[in-house]
Structures are given as structure tokens and as C-alpha cells.
Image (cartoon, rainbow, N blue to C red):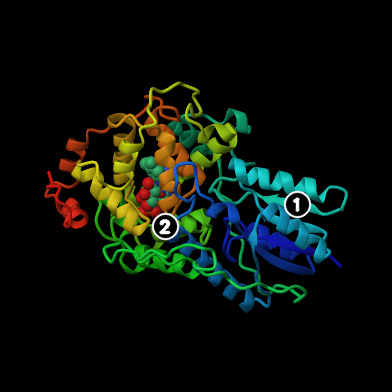
């Protein structure tokens, strides 16, 4: 009788989860497992933790819902806090499984986890079977071997769009055959993890609750109830409120919903409502996400390093005072400070804001771009290694930008995107800095 572990990683869902479907297909008994990686709680060399409370809270909500969904299917979620590469092989021994199914992750640390896990399992006859599933395009379907994937987005998009068909979704299993053989483990609270809870500002674009049904609730609201997809292309650069963009990113980052599921909903919307440049544009933005994942696979660890993927030496200082002023929203530049206050008080910032604050840190303050990326890693509830580090590298000029970096004029940007100073006023109303 085949006994298998389904090791959940950034795929906290039951619908369109290839790893879960394969585990259920191959295992007569399936043990769903999640290990909250203790390293998320570590303090960085810059003095703040890798993962702030908003992000952990979103993760805990997502795990609570996943557990509930697995229970409805007759199983449970075996939950531990520790290092996955130690805990999962230990559980595999304890539960006498033949295989561990999981999502294929491509960032350096996630690859290391599987590598170390395989070393621990050597000679035990337990196989790790990882399944590619976080992108729209499957790695086997793109027209290049990984080392030849184009480094320029437009080339990647044009060629793959022409040739790649997006694979269909996997339905959620009807039932999971499970046995209670080990303690499922309590879902920890922030306090258990030694994290001081922060209160999200009421001005946040959304209350942002993690979980699969919350992801679908947001999709249904944005596409179907409020019918906002049809004008997405013209609103996506705005700064205020829940309507200007999809806000799918936090749920995508943890895999509460798959990019493929969003794609098929876009297709449905195009059939049932309208098909226009906006419906295409959401797909286009999801392709950026795909592109950065393929770039992570191609360039490995270099995406996290100061010379980036180009290897160029940048003149950047390790100026702690300038960095901390930026980080805390106290540069004196209202448009920058307002965005940083929003990020710090809510865990979210618009794409337009992210581009500007990154450009300001890099090109106006000349501070080490990797520090900015580390602060984003702590703050963003949608933190995703590929999208975060490669967007930063792009703006710094050591990533995928053929123009070798983007410097934004903060004055022009704030006049264009916040002409009446409403956004700045909203976030800096208690500050002494005057809006432009
Ligand atoms: C410096 C910097 C850091 C960033 N860090 C992250 C990060 O850690 N996690 C993250 O998900 N996004 C990151 N982004 C990309 C982008 O800002 C967010 O995906 C977007 O703002 C999320 O809001 P939304 O879901 O409403 O986006 P929408 O405009 O509704 O877009 C839909 C989806 O497309 C994808 N997408 C859109 N723009 C980009 C982009 N530039 N790069 C990659 N994917 C994109 C996202 O998955 C997004 O959810 C970063 C951008 C910059 C400039």
C-alpha cells in the first residue's frame, strides 16, 4: 500500500494543485504536511527580521483555511515549526512513506531545502517528487532550455505567447485517504512565534486575509461583482483604494490561488462579459511574474546579490542613516515617505509606489539596493523572491532591463500620479512634511 506525504510549500490550496493531485493519485494514504520555516523568524544583518508580522499573519490565516479544507476532504494538516529539510524526512520515516510530493520551487533556498532533504533520505527508498506549478507556462512547454530563456521580457513574452498553451487546471480531490498516526500539531499564534502583532491601518487598500476562499472572494469581487477587469489597464497605476488593481499578489505569493486559475477566469470573463486591452493586460502582468520565475531558475543565487545577474559593479553606499530614513518614511520627500508609511502600516504598496521608492533609494540616495529588497521582504505580504529581487535588480540596472536601470523623477511622478496630493495627504497627514 503506497503511503505518501504531500508537503505543502507556496501552494496553500486544494484546487489546481498538481502536487496534491499527484499525491492523491499515487498514494493510498496521503499525509498533508506543512513546516513553518523557523528561518523566517531570524533577524537579518540589518537588524530587522526576515518576515514581519503582517506577512506571518497572512500565512497563518492561509494555513488555518488549508487545514479546514483538508478536513472537509477527510484529512488534516500536520503542522510543525522548524526546518523543513529536517522535519519532513523525520516525518517520512515516522509515517513510513514511499514518496514526498511537493511543488517545485526555484529560488536558491527552496532548492537547497530539497537538495538537503534528498541527502537525508538517501538509501531509504523515499523519493522527493516535485511538480512544476507556480507559473502560467509549464517549464516543459516553453520553447527554450532554461539556460537559453531570453533575458529580455518582450522577447520572452512574444515567443512564448505564440507557442505555449497553458495547461488545464487540476480539480480539487473529492476525498483524501488519511490516517491519524501522528499529532496534527496546533497552528501557532504570533505570540507563540515570539512576534509582536502589529495593527494594520484602517486606510489599507484591503483588510487582506490569507486563504484559498479569500483569494476567490477577491477574484469574484474584482472580476464579477464590481466588474473592474474591463478597465484594469487604465487604473493599474493608481495609488488609492481597492479598485485600481487586482490585489491578487498576496494570495499568489503563497499559492492560495494559482496563476492558471486566474488565467482561466480571465478567459471566462472575456467570453461572458468583455474582451479588451484590459483583460489582456492582466494576463500580460502575470507574464511578468512568469518571466521573473524563469529568470530565477536561469540565474540562481545571483538574483540576491549586489552585482545581480549582469555582474556589474555598482557605486552604492552602505549608508545606514539614509537607509533608515527611507525605510521609516522620513526622507522629507513626501511622495516617497507616503508610500513607505503605507507599506509599513499595511504590508502593501502599489506597483507605481514600489517603482518610485526603489528608484529613490538606488538612484537618489545611492544606497545598496539589496537593503531595500530586504526591507520589502520583511514588509510585503505578497513577498515573492523572484518578483521582489528581480524587480529591484531591474531598477538598479543589474537585472533584466535592456536600458540598464530606471531612474524616476519623483517630482514628475508625484505630479502625474498624485496631482492633487491626496495620496500624500492620506498617509502623511500627521507628519510635518508638506505635500508637493
Ligand atoms: C521594487 C519592486 C518589488 C516588488 N516586489 C514584489 C513582490 O515581492 N511580490 C509580488 O508579487 N510582486 C512584487 N512586485 C511587483 C508588483 O508591484 C506587484 O505584483 C503588484 O503591485 C501587486 O499588486 P496587484 O496584485 O494589485 O497587481 P496587478 O496590477 O493587479 O497585477 C496582477 C498580478 O500580476 C503580477 N505582477 C504585476 N506586476 C508585476 C511585476 N512588476 N513583476 C512581477 N509580477 C507582477 C502579480 O502577480 C500581480 O498580482 C514588485 C515590484 C517592484 C517595483
Look at 43% across and 41% down and name the residue there.
373
Q: Quadrant of residue 18?
A: bottom right
Q: CA distance from mark 1 to mark 2?
A: 30 Å
Of labels 1 and 2, earlier in sequence is 1
Q: Quadrant of the N terminus?
A: bottom right
Check residue 34 in the rendering and tell me which mark sits there, or answer none: none
Q: Is residue 108 left or right of residue 251?
A: right
Residue 388, x across and y down, in percent: 45, 43
Q: Quadrant of the C terminus?
A: top left
Residue under pointer 1 = 128
Residue 334 visible (yes or no): yes
Residue 250, x across and y down, in percent: 44, 57
Residue behind label 2 places its C-beta within 8 angstroms of ligand 1: yes
Look at 54% across and 51% down and name the residue there.
42
Mark 2 neighbour density, 10 Å: few (under 14) some (14–19) many (20 or more): some
Residue 175, x across and y down, in percent: 68, 74
Residue 274, x across and y down, in percent: 34, 58
Residue under pointer 2 = 248
Task: Name the one closer to the observer, 3 or 40.
Answer: 40
Task: Name the one closer to the observer, 64 or 173.
Answer: 64
Badge 2 marks a residue whose secondary structure is loop
Q: Nearer the viewer, mark 1 or mark 2?
A: 1
Q: Is residue 417 left or right of residue 34?
A: left
Residue behind label 1 places its C-beta within 8 angstroms of ligand 1: no
The total of numbered circles placed on residues is 2
Amino acid at each position: 500500500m503506497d503511503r505518501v506525504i504531500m508537503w505543502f510549500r507556496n501552494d496553500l490550496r486544494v484546487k489546481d494543485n498538481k502536487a496534491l493531485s499527484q499525491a492523491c493519485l499515487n498514494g493510498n494514504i496521503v499525509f498533508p504536511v506543512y513546516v513553518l520555516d523557523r528561518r523566517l523568524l531570524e533577524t537579518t544583518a540589518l537588524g530587522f527580521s526576515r518576515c514581519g508580522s503582517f506577512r506571518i499573519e497572512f500565512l497563518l490565516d492561509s494555513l488555518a483555511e488549508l487545514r479546514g479544507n483538508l478536513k472537509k476532504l477527510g484529512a488534516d494538516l500536520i503542522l510543525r515549526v522548524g526546518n523543513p529539510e529536517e522535519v519532513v524526512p523525520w516525518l517520512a520515516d515516522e509515517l513510513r512513506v514511499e514518496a514526498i510530493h511537493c511543488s517545485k520551487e526555484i529560488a536558491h533556498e527552496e532548492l537547497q531545502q530539497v537538495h538537503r532533504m534528498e541527502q537525508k533520505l538517501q538509501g531509504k527508498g523515499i523519493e522527493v517528487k516535485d511538480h512544476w506549478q507556480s507559473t502560467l507556462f509549464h517549464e516543459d512547454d516553453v520553447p527554450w532550455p532554461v539556460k537559453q530563456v531570453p533575458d529580455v521580457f518582450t522577447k520572452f513574452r512574444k515567443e512564448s505567447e505564440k507557442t505555449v498553451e497553458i495547461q488545464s487546471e487540476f480539480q480539487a480531490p473529492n476525498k483524501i485517504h488519511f490516517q491519524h498516526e501522528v499529532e496534527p500539531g496546533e497552528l501557532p499564534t504570533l505570540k507563540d512565534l515570539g512576534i509582536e502583532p502589529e495593527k494594520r491601518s484602517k486606510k489599507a487598500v484591503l483588510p487582506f486575509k490569507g486563504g484559498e476562499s479569500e483569494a476567490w472572494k477577491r477574484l469574484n469581487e474584482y472580476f464579477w461583482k464590481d466588474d473592474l477587469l474591463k478597465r484594469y489597464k487604465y487604473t493599474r497605476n493608481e495609488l488609492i483604494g481597492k479598485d485600481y488593481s487586482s490585489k491578487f499578489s498576496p494570495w499568489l505569493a503563497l499559492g492560495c490561488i494559482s496563476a492558471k486559475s486566474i488565467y482561466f477566469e480571465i478567459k471566462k470573463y472575456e467570453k461572458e462579459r468583455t474582451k479588451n486591452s484590459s483583460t489582456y493586460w492582466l494576463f500580460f502582468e502575470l507574464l511578468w511574474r512568469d518571466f521573473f520565475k524563469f529568470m530565477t531558475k536561469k540565474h540562481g543565487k545571483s538574483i540576491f546579490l549586489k552585482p545581480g545577474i549582469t555582474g556589474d559593479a555598482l557605486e552604492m553606499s552602505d549608508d545606514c542613516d539614509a537607509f533608515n530614513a527611507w525605510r521609516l518614511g522620513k526622507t522629507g520627500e513626501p511622495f516617497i515617505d507616503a508610500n513607505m508609511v503605507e507599506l509599513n502600516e499595511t504590508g502593501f504598496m502599489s506597483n507605481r509606489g514600489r517603482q518610485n521608492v526603489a528608484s529613490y533609494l538606488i538612484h537618489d540616495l545611492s544606497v545598496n539596493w539589496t537593503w531595500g529588497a530586504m526591507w520589502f521582504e520583511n514588509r510585503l505580504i505578497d513577498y515573492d523572491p523572484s518578483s521582489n529581487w528581480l524587480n529591484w535588480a531591474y531598477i538598479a540596472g543589474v537585472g533584466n532591463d535592456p536600458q540598464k536601470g530606471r531612474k524616476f523623477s519623483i517630482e514628475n511622478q508625484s505630479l502625474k500620479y498624485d496631482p492633487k496630493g491626496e495620496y500624500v495627504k492620506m498617509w502623511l497627514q500627521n507628519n510635518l512634511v508638506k505635500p508637493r
